[in-house]
Amino acid sequence: MICVLYVSKHHKNTEKLLKSLNGCDGIEVDLFDFNKGEIPDFNKYEYIGFGSGIYAGKFDKNLRSYIDKNFDASGKKVFLVSTSGIGKTAHNNSLEKTLSEKGASVIGSFNCKGFDTFGPLKIIGGKGKGRPNEEDMKNFRKYILSIIK
C-alpha cells in the first residue's frame, strides 16, 4: 500500500502529477492533502511519499516542519515527489538527507517541471506552461513502478 502526504499550491502541479497515478498500471495510492489537515496513519502503508512544489529551492516549509517534528521515519520506505519551474531533482536532496538521518530508507526521488509564475515570471506569463504534461505523468508512473517492485 502506498500513501503520499503532499502540498500543492498555486497551479496544483504536484497534485496533478500525483492524481495521474491512481488506476494506471494497477497502482493505487492514497493521497493526503497536508493543507487540508489530512494526515495518514503511516503505519498502515508499506511505501510513504512526500510531495510538494518547490518554493525558493525547497519543499513547502510547513510540510517540512511537520516531517522534522512529527514523522517517525525509522524503518519506513520513503520516496519524494516535487515539481518546480526548473525541474531539478536536487531540490529534494535536503529532505532526503533529513529522512535518512531519521532512519528512513529513501527509495527514490522524482522532480519534473511545473508551471511557474513566481515573482518576475508572472510578468512574462510564467514558464513551464502546460507542465506537468502527459510525458511527465508517464515518466512519473514509470518511476513509481520502478521503486515499488
Image: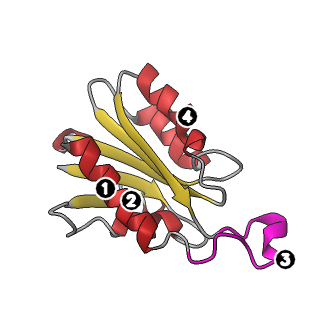
Q: Residue at x 59, y 39 (%)?
A: 90
Is residue 3 shown left or right of residue 12? left
Q: Secondary structure at mark 2?
A: helix
**Residue denoted by label 3:** 123
Quadrant containing the C terminus in the rendered view: top left
Q: Amino acid at mark 3?
A: Ile
| Residue of label 1 | 142
- What colouring style does the render use? secondary structure
Badge 3, how many Cα within 10 Å: few under 14, some, many 20+?
A: few
Q: Earlier in the sequence, mark 3 or mark 1?
A: 3
Q: Position of residue 25 (x, y in %)?
A: 18, 64
Q: Label 1 near label 2: C-beta < 8 Å?
A: yes
Instruction: State the CA–CA distance, disc 3 to disc 1.
Output: 35 Å
Q: Secondary structure at mark 1?
A: helix
Task: Give the structural element (helix, strand or loop) at label 3.
Answer: loop
Cα separation between marks 2 and 4: 20 Å
Residue type pointed to by label 4: Asn
Pointer 1 or 4: first along the chain: 4
* Position of residue 45 in the picture relative to residue 136 (left or right): left
Q: Earlier in the sequence, mark 3 or mark 2?
A: 3
- Work out whether mark 3 precedes mark 4 in sequence or the reverse, and give the earlier one: 4
Give above or below for 48 relative to 77.
Answer: below
- Give the number of the disc on residue 21: none
Residue 60: percent from left, percent from top: 58, 50
Residue 139 image label? 2
Assess whether residue 121 is covered by the magenta stretch.
Answer: yes
Q: CA distance from mark 2 to mark 1?
A: 5 Å
Residues rendered magenta in the picture? 116-130
